[in-house]
Amino acid sequence: MDYTLSTTLALPYYEAVNATRKALDKEGFGILTEIDLAATMKAKLGVNLAPWVILGACRPQLAHEALQVDPSIASVLPCNVVVRSIDGRRAEIATSVRKAKKKGGNPFRFSIYGYKFPVRGPHTYGDGLGAGRGHQGQDILADCGLKIVAARAGTVYYNDYDAGGAGNYLVINTKGPGDGSEVYMHMIKPSPIKVGEKVKTGQKIGIVGTTGHSTACHLHFERWSAPGWYQGGTILDPTPGLKRWDSYS
């Protein structure tokens, strides 16, 4: 069974360990723990294994961001990166942490993600920020009835209906680095999440619709800086973030 994401390097073991350390450092990961698996198995069980090391890597900024979203993420920290000798000329690098999908990219590039793309199904991008008409967010065109989830954890600040604009909409004040508000508009019916309730990243909060001032099924999504939506914050361009989250979730 495949429990990991891995790559094989055409390098002797000790060179592969060195390359791994340098690549992790370049990506901002420090090594918190190091276990010589071969030496441990020899000392405890008297068995011989090929050279094998487990590096406990951590990128503080990403770890802190993930912990703000879900404290239970601590159970998988630090991120184990394993280097194992295959035949003296090659080494396998493996990790249980999600790897960047970019084809031909750095095999050592690992990330922890604190966001989820909000529309869970086929979609395209409509008008973005401005659009020549003062548009304040990004339209995500999708079939009515598709699930909408919270892009990031937080607390519901507003849950209302606006016949001449947003239709059924929900405002979530997010938590953690870059906190502010995220707004979800034109939902098919009112969100069941009440004001003051906490939501988790990826939790269902509504359904794609076309209520309010809308001509097609879509989610209008906004991001606001701290302290939040009409709380003194300013509108942010949500499109770069959405496309980044879309690439991995």
Image (cartoon, rainbow, N blue to C red):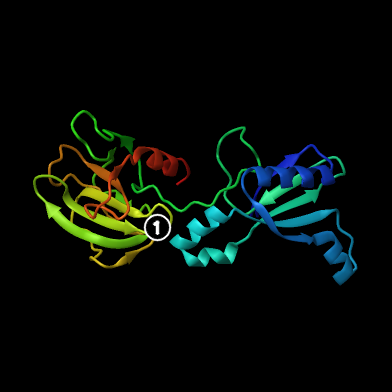
Relative to 66, does residue 196 appear above or below in the rendering?
A: below
In the drawing, does residue 90 fall left or right of residue 224?
right
Q: In x, y percent, where is residue 4?
A: 64, 52
Image position of 52 (left or right of 46): left
Q: Name the residue tied to disc 1.
A: 201
Q: Quadrant of the N terminus?
A: bottom right
Three-letter code for the amino acid on which mark 1 is drawn: Thr
Tell which residue pokes out farthest to the front in this image.
Answer: 232
The x, y position of residue 196, in whole percent, is 26, 67
How many labels were placed on the picture? 1
What x and y, as percent, mark residue 94? 69, 50
Is 181 in front, or is 101? 181
> Residue lying furthest bottom in this view?
44
Residue depicted at 69% across the width and 42% down the height = 23
* Element class at badge 1: loop
Judged from this view, the residue extending furthest toward the left is 164
Q: Residue at x 37, y 52 (%)?
A: 151
- Image quarter for residue 195? bottom left
**Up/down of 48 relative to 11, above or below:** below
Please indicate whether residue 101 sits to the left or right of residue 54 in the image.
left
Q: Position of residue 85 (x, y in %)?
A: 82, 48
Viewer-closest of 124 and 178? 178
For the residue pair 49 and 222, the one nearer the viewer reads as: 222
- Tell me the crowding category of disc 1: few under 14, some 14 to 19, or many 20 or more residues within 10 angstroms, Cα based: some
- Give the residue at x 59% y 53%: 59
Q: Would you say 130 lies left or right of 92 here?
A: left
